[in-house]
Image (tube, rainbow, N blue to C red):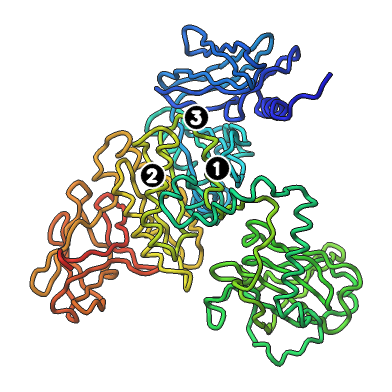
Amino acid sequence: MSALPRPLLACLLASFLLGGALTAQSPRLALDPLLGDHMVLQRQAEAVVSGAADADAAVVVEASWLDAPLTGRADAKGRFRIAVPTGPAGGPHSLVVRAGDATITLRDVVVGEVWLASGQSNMEWPVKACGPEADAAREMERAAADERPALVRVFDVAHRAAARPEDGVTGRWIDPGPDEVGDVSAVAYFFARERARALGIPIGILGSNWGGTPAHAWTSAAALREHGGFDEALDRIDREREDFDESPAGFAARREAYRNALRERDPGYRENWSAPDADLGAWHERADASTWTEDPLANFDGSVWFRVRFRATAEEAARAEAIELGPVDDQDEVWIGGRRLGGDSGQGSWNRPRRYPIPAGTLVAGENVLVLRVLDTGGAGGIAGPATANRIVLRPEGDARTAIPLEGPWHYRIGMKLSDAPPAPRRELCGPWDPSALYRGMIAPLRDVALAGALWYQGESDVGRAERYDTLFPAMIRDWRRTFGRPALPFLFVQIAPFEYGPRGDSARLREAQGRALELPATGMAVILDLGDAKDIHPRRKREVGRRLALLARGIVDGEDRAATESPRVASAERDGASLALRFGADGPAIELRGAGGFELAGADGVFHPAAATITGPRALRLRSEAVSEPRRARYAWSNVPESTLFGANGLPASSFRVAVAGN
């Protein structure tokens, strides 16, 4: 018997993994991975049942909610697609697919709403990592006790950066129980729970997200070429994708070539700065190796070498087990006594804590020298987390585990600018920062799914590129709507929270760019200006973020009064003597002040000064500053970590904004 074609074999494997019951008589039928037990189908829509069968085979679909079966036929390559009307919300149902004597039965299928939840790490952030701010432990307890508040189902799309649009994804539908709910996107889960409670129907989440990724990675190549500014990178991918060697041997060869190039260009390698007796004359002292924000490293991207001395007794040297460091942003290598212990340069390594084994005989009794090379590829670099987490762990003696702290002082020296480094080697042709790579691998394969709408939480990786985000973000929304065949697909997004970005960029400007996407129809922005943490880019109150997205859905999808579901939005400014009168949207909520700060005024010179705000009507306020006699411009919450004082009567905060008198 000849071997099965690889695509068909993959489909068959996927069917088993997804729980579909494949008969033993024939291997001639498989369903695409998005179809499986526990799946949610969009109500009052058409669900596409697709998969592989024998070429030209007749395919029959039976759904328990339909009065009669539907028929179709596989094409010459064995692919089939059959549109199945879904009808009203309900279930559980079964769906049976037959081709010849092969049968697949999907069970516990429900009809409700399906939402795509995408973005970067704040969308990816799981329930279990939210802590007490989102009552994460209670959520998992409820699932364990089978106290699930509503039917929430989740399909988590596996990470895939692709050089061309993919036809399928990897993943499975789950009905999150105690072993799964902690790993579900917190924002998506809390949104789905609120939505299910409000409507009393099942809610399905397609989670397609990847931490640290920019908007251009989630946009199609056609849309990016139309937008402009990405042709060179897209051309490179088109040019290389036919010949790129993705085998382990190919990657090993590229990695060795990269290391050789670094040794040639980085003086730290050329001059052997990892040696324990290296001359410290040109090195600077620092308290620790934590994230750098101060000069001369504040705006530096590239390699920085760190050294720290520590002492060990003979017994401790013999018991040395491993070195533990916090997450290193972005890549690292570690030496002790001139001996290389390891390094991490993989994708997403910026948020992985480091732990490298220490071979016997590495440490000596007395003074030891640890050298850490950090390669920062953007933003702030260094070791994240408390300095107390950096230590030499010793094998336990009895029941006790001890460690040698790396207390410092540390010394550092700048090695090579990132602009002088060669491109890092790739395991695959595309990475998650490449233009269109995530659209091709994680959005395009979902194009046949009927959706209720999309959720989006991203923007942190585009801080510093707000001018481009102004037009790119709306272009991405229009692009997705074309992909899913819905010109007015509801698109709900989260405005980035306050965080001390430092030299990385002006986040108020990025928040403004996000708000401009509201000019598109059927869009809504969840403002979270009051939920941020200046020291943590991942604010933990994800339950409230999900609730605010669910409020937006009630206004945009269900037609409820937007004054109850949206934040106030400034509409105009008019000069009144030495004051500036601001008016807010007539269809938005009445406004109220919860503090005195956050407002500024400027005159013709453009210099802003603090201003006092007074409410003058349900949707109006007046600003005045003794330092500005003829005000022409106003702004609110215009900083990386602003004070949030302006709210709607519905309890939702207003966004950062800038506004000027007409003609200015």
Q: 277 or 618: nearer the eye?
A: 277
Q: Label 2 belongs to which residue? A: 492
Q: Label 1 belongs to which residue? A: 440
Q: CA distance from mark 3 to mark 1?
A: 14 Å
Q: CA distance from mark 2 to mark 1?
A: 22 Å
Mark 3 element type: loop
x then y, percent, for residue 46: 44, 22
- Pointer 3 or 2: first along the chain: 3
Mark 2 element type: strand
Identify the residue at horizontal 42%, vertical 57% (top origin).
496
Crowd class of label 3 (few under 14; some 14 to 19; many from 20; radius 10 Å): some
Above or below — where is 440 with respect to 299?
A: above
Q: Label 3 belongs to which residue? A: 448
Q: CA distance from mark 3 to mark 2?
A: 20 Å
The amino acid at mark 2 is Leu
x then y, percent, for residue 287: 63, 83
Crowd class of label 2 (few under 14; some 14 to 19; many from 20; radius 10 Å): many
The amino acid at mark 3 is Asp
- Pointer 2 or 1: first along the chain: 1
